[in-house]
Every structure is written in structure tokens, then in C-alpha cells.
Image (cartoon, grey):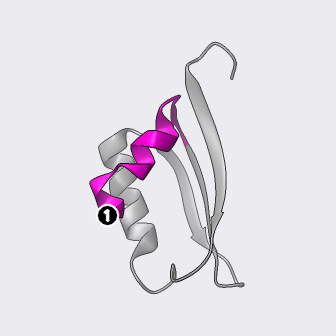
Amino acid sequence: MEGTGKIRQHLRISGSVQGVGFRYRAQQAAGMLGVTGWVKNNWDDTVEMEAQGSLSLPLRIANSPSWQ
């Protein structure tokens, strides 16, 4: 994706992420941030996510009100 000003991140999140609205909140945050991608529950009680957006994506996700 060189020269496009975009980044894609693949994440696996563990902890209390199933049964607490994590995927819903991820979708809401993505909509607010202009991020595309997917989120799914795994059988090992983790959540897997792939997100694509601008190069400032990691900072924007971390600072999103949906995560706080």
C-alpha cells in the first residue's frame, strides 16, 4: 500500500471481549473514524479484527470515545 497514505492492521484481542458488545462498539468506532474492515469472535474467546484507514489509524482508534 505504499504511497496511498493508508494502513491495514490485523489484531487479536483477548480478555473480556465476548458478550460485552465489543464487536458492536468496534463497528461504531469504525463508522466514526472512516475505517473499513471486519471483526469476528473466535472459539478461543478472543476477538479478531482487521482495520484499514489512514496512517493515523492506530492513534485514532486508541483515542476514540467508543473505547473509553
Q: Give the range drawn in magenta.
A: 52-68
- Residue at (43% x, 48% y) in the render: 61
Q: SS at mark 1?
A: loop
Quarter of the figure that contains the C terminus: bottom left
Q: Name the residue under label 1.
A: 68
Does 12 lie within the magenta span?
no
Give the percent coordinates (x, y) of residue 11: 64, 57
Give the percent coordinates (x, y) of residue 50: 61, 52
The residue furthest top is: 3
- Residue at (64% x, 84% y) in the render: 45
- Residue at (56% x, 26% y) in the render: 6
Q: In this view, does 17 lie to the left or right of 2?
A: left
How many dots with numbers? 1
Compared with 52, 40 (above or below) is below
- Residue 23: name its quadrant: bottom left
Give the percent coordinates (x, y) of residue 25: 36, 65
The crowd level at tag 1 (other Cα within 10 Å; few <14, some 14-19, many 20+) is few
Quarter of the figure that contains the N terminus: top right
- Residue at (67% x, 51% y) in the render: 10
Give the percent coordinates (x, y) of residue 53: 50, 35
Compared with 53, 6 (above or below) is above
Q: In this view, does 68 lie to the left or right of 45?
A: left
Q: Is residue 7 left or right of residue 44?
A: left
> Which residue type carries mark 1?
Gln
